[in-house]
Every structure is written in C-alpha cells, then in structure tokens.
Amino acid sequence: MRLGAIEAGGTKFVLGVGDEFGHIFERKRIETRTPEVTLGETIEFFKDKEVEAIGIGTFGPVRLDVHAFDYGHILRTPKPGWAGVDIVRPFTDGLGVPVKLDTDVNASCLGEVTYGSSKGLDPVVYLTVGTGVGAGIFVNGALVHGDLHPEVGHMILPVSPDEPVDSPSCCPRHDNCLEGLACGVSVEHRWGRKGEELYENKAVWELEAHYLSVFCANMICVISPKRLILGGGIMEVEGLFPMIRDNTDRLLNGYLGDVDRKRLETLITGTSLRGDEGLMGALKLAAEAGH
C-alpha cells in the first residue's frame, strides 16, 4: 500500500509517504502556522502522491471518539487559532481517502511496538519529554483511549524538597503536574537558561531524574509495562537514564521483587527508531484506515 503519514505538532508538521512495512519514501517538514495555511499546505503536498489512506498523529487534546459530534477536533490548546479545528475532514474532503487519527504520542508508541525494538511487547508506555510532556499507552494489543485519551503530562506529582524555587511549575493549570515540573520549558523556568546550556550542571538533571523516576514508578505500579520508553529532547542528556533507573529502584524499594535495578536496564529505555517513531506510527494508522 502507498500511504500518507502526518506527525502534526505544535511547532512543526512532518509529512511522509511510505508503506505498511514502515518504509518512508519521501518526507517534508513544514512549520505549524494558522490552521488554514498549515492544513492547506499539507493537503497540497499529498495531492500528487497517490496515497490510499492517511494516518495522523496530532498534538492535542483532541477528540478521538468517532461517534462524538466533534470527532477529529482539537480541543483546548494554547496554540493560537487551533482550538476547535477539525483536523480530519479537510483530508477526507480534500483527498478523498480514509483517515485514521490519534495523538502524536500514541502514534509514537504505535511506531515503536509495530516497527521498533518493542515489537511483540505488551503493555508498553511511551513518554516524550520535550517542550511539553505526553504519553502513549499500548495495552492488550491496542492503544489506550477512554473518555478522552491519556494525559499523563498532567499527572500530579509531589514537588521535590530539593526544588531551588518556590513555584517551579510552568503549567498554567497545575502547580505540580509532570509537564509543569519536568518539561523543557520548566527547566528553563526554574534555572533561567535552556536545557542545552545546563548540561554540566548536575543538580539540574538530578532534579529532572527525580520527577521522571516518580512517573516511572507510578507507571510500573499501575500499568506493569514490559517496556517504558522515554523519548524527546530532554532524554538526550547524557547520564540521565542511569539516574532515572537508580531513583526508580529506590522509590519501588524492593516491593516488586522481580523489578530490580538489573531489570530496569531493559524496562526503562530510549527510543529505537531514530526519531521516526511518530511518522512510522502514523503509517501504521494509515494502513489500518485503508483496510
């Protein structure tokens, strides 16, 4: 099958043409601007590609219930002009092909369990830590959807006693959620400089590892995943993974006897698809839409 894939982010859209085996033949990156301009340019890209279906992994929150009156609409978002935008119908109308939609992080999770090193594992949790924080969850052979979709970035965490500032959260709604405490914007908010300028400051990454290890311990206790994948720009910091594993082991405190420090080496890992997990997951969504 010849398939279209869209990784729709708040900063950029990555467009791809590929097949159901995860091969990407062509790609293009465009900046996320107004909905009219961005969606129009995206549709124009695909018009001569002869794709049979489109898969979209989008920023959100977004309505994924196909029976809802606002299915495919972006919901509350700080991205100017995007709240209430229908991200599905422009493609079904403009290209005349079936479309399957999910969140960007669910698409990344799907890419990893379909084409990556987590193939054959279940359950799997995928967390991205960058400008924001989000997670995709794969359980019993399917991505998790509920009344909305997982919003793990807004999991409430205790603020560390080692916080150097009184109000560390950058989230406008929560004083102590995972995104507010651990995303890239939070690092800059707390320390006054971007993360890439703080690589040598050990205290920055010890605190980051603490918050991410609380997330990992919670996911291990709630989901009991076979793999917990941490991706995004923050996770490129050298030495962060060992600190997260050490802290997670300390938090679990031996309660789950078989989840010891050695097991955490293979349980908590990085991505395996070199940044293409979102686009490849969108190809899988397209393949499902086309069948």
Image (tube, rainbow, N blue to C red):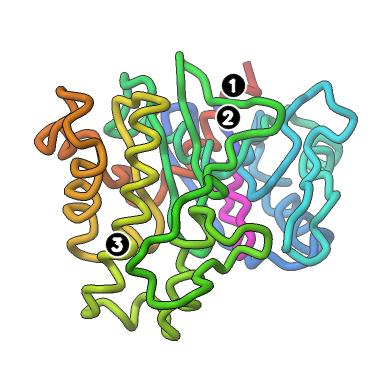
Question: In the rendered view of the protein, which quadrant contains the N terminus?
Answer: top right
Q: Position of residue 170 (x, y in %)?
A: 57, 68
Looking at this view, name the residue that lies furthest to the front.
161
Q: Which residue is mark 2?
A: 285
Q: Estimate how packed mark 3 is, as few (under 14), some (14 to 19) or many (20 or more) residues with alpha carbons within 10 Å.
A: some
Q: Which mark is residue 288?
A: 1
Q: Foreground: 230 or 8?
A: 230
* Rendered residue at 31%/80% (across/down): 198
* Rendered residue at 45%/14% (across/down): 140
Left or right: where 182 falls relative to 229: right
Q: Is residue 42 magenta?
A: no
Q: Which residue is mark 3?
A: 236
Range shown magenta:
6-16
Q: Position of residue 81 (x, y in %)?
A: 83, 63
Looking at this view, name the residue that lies furthest to the right.
69
Q: Which mark is residue 274?
A: none
* SS at mark 3 in the image: helix
> Which amino acid is tagged 1?
Glu
